Image (spheres, rainbow, N blue to C red):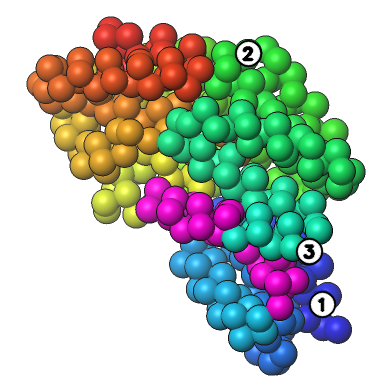
């Protein structure tokens, strides 16, 4: 019974700001994991516990807990247990190198959902597929969304409708329907009664940042980002976003200071989680906007291997990584490569049906 109570606690998600864990929830989880031995229950508790740590920045602990959950689920063997464990991989396995494993998990969830006749499990599978399609710029994303819409209609849960809001907003953003996207994500704020308010607000904020970036209006968020960076100095993603907004606003000193904080000690402050590629995108875009070869040389080794990917921030994208990569190549004197990459990026954005991003990849833009 204690373990089941912890599962429910974890499902609520953390109630503190990004970059911090709820100490009470963490303590309760650790006590439960110390006494729960039944494999099925252990799997559920460990998997649900990743939610608290995923929002708190302890990505290593997240991965350890998911691995423990999967080992316990394997011992138990029941598909019902796997159905409760694998959806937590959505936030835990969120680095660029996790894409193949995420795809395999989505395929397995589809099979389990069909076998158990559980549309909620199938929905989780297609949400993972949607995010995977976004990261590689695949038109399959729209097929994923249509399937999610049908499954959500069958499930009829209020928390699921909140999730559908951020998925619809992301699709509209990619399609270039920016006003519609902002209206959808603004409406998602009405769901703070059924999901932890901190999660709802955090998702709203990152979508607003994404929309301002594609519209070339990132400077408008400078004040808000400065406040977030000041209040949560340990969150690297805020420092990266602040750096870019400051660069766009013409505050070079602030941009450089934030860039330095985010890249210090080989980007140690950037959590290797769902915010990672978003942070890299902003840092690359900052160096490109400033046209600084030293800053560009510092960030290029981290972003150049991702030139064929789209950034992913848990629920949406800040844009294709090829943009800041090309801008940094320009800054370090590799202009011919930048021209080639932008041309490839425009073609990929056109195929993806992302007109705003195709425009951003014009040769004179970041």
Residue occupied by mark 1? 4
In this rendering, the answer to whether 181 lies above or below 157 is above
Residue 174 image point, x, y percent: 55, 21
Which element is circle 3 on? helix
Nearest-to-viewer mark from 3 and 2: 3
In the rendered view, does 327 fall on the left or right side of 125? Answer: left
Quarter of the image that includes the C terminus? top left
In the rendered view, does 193 fall on the left or right side of 41? Answer: right
Q: Is residue 310 visible?
A: yes
In this rendering, the answer to whether 323 lies above or below 227 is above
Q: Dot 1 surroundings within 10 Å: few (below 14), some, or many (20 or more)?
A: some
Residue 116 bears which disc, if any?
Answer: 3
How many numbered marks, from 0 up? 3
Give how far apart the Cα atoms at labels 3 and 2 are.
37 Å
Nearest-to-viewer mark from 1 and 3: 3
Of residue 99 and residue 330, the one placed in the foreground of this image is 99
Give how far apart the Cα atoms at labels 1 and 3 are.
22 Å
Residue 251 image point, x, y percent: 37, 19
Residue occupied by mark 2? 177
Nearest-to-viewer mark from 1 and 2: 2
Of residue 334 and residue 38, the one placed in the foreground of this image is 38
Which element is circle 1 on? helix
Quarter of the image that includes the N terminus? bottom right
In this rendering, the answer to whether 255 lies above or below 270 is above
Of residue 261 and residue 309, the one placed in the foreground of this image is 309
């Amino acid at each position: 019974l204690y373990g089941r109570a912890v599962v429910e606690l974890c499902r609520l998600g953390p109630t503190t700001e990004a970059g911090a864990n709820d100490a009470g929830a963490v303590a309760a989880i650790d006590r439960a994991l110390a006494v729960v031995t039944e494999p099925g229950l252990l799997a559920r508790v460990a998997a649900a516990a990743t939610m608290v740590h995923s929002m708190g920045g302890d990505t290593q602990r997240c991965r350890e807990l998911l691995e423990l959950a999967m080992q316990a689920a394997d011992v138990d063997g029941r598909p019902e247990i796997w159905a409760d464990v694998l959806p937590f991989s959505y936030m835990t396995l969120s680095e660029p190198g996790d894409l193949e494993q995420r795809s395999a998990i989505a395929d397995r969830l589809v099979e389990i959902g069909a076998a158990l006749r559980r549309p909620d499990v199938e929905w989780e599978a297609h949400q993972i597929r949607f995010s995977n399609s976004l990261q590689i710029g695949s038109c399959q994303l729209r097929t994923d969304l249509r399937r999610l819409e049908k499954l959500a209609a069958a499930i009829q849960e209020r928390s699921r409708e909140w999730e559908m809001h951020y998925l619809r907003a992301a699709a509209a953003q990619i399609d270039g329907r920016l006003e519609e996207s902002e209206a959808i994500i603004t409406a998602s704020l009405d769901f703070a009664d059924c999901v932890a308010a901190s999660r709802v607000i955090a998702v709203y904020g990152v979508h607003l940042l994404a929309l301002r970036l594609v519209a070339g209006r990132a400077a408008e968020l400078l004040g808000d980002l400065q406040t977030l960076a000041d209040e949560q100095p340990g969150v690297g993603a805020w420092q990266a976003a602040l750096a870019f907004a400051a660069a766009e606003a013409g505050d070079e000193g602030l941009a450089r200071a934030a860039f330095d904080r985010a890249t210090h000690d080989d980007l140690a402050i950037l959590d290797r989680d769902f915010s990672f590629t978003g942070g890299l995108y902003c840092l690359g875009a900052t160096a490109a906007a400033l046209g600084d070869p030293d800053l560009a040389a510092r960030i290029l080794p981290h972003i150049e291997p991702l030139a064929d990917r789209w950034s992913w921030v848990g629920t949406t994208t800040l844009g294709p990584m090829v943009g800041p990569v090309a801008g940094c190549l320009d800054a370090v004197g590799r202009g011919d490569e930048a021209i080639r990459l932008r041309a490839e990026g425009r073609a990929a954005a056109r195929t993806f049906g992302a007109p705003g991003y195709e425009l951003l990849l014009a040769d004179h833009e970041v």
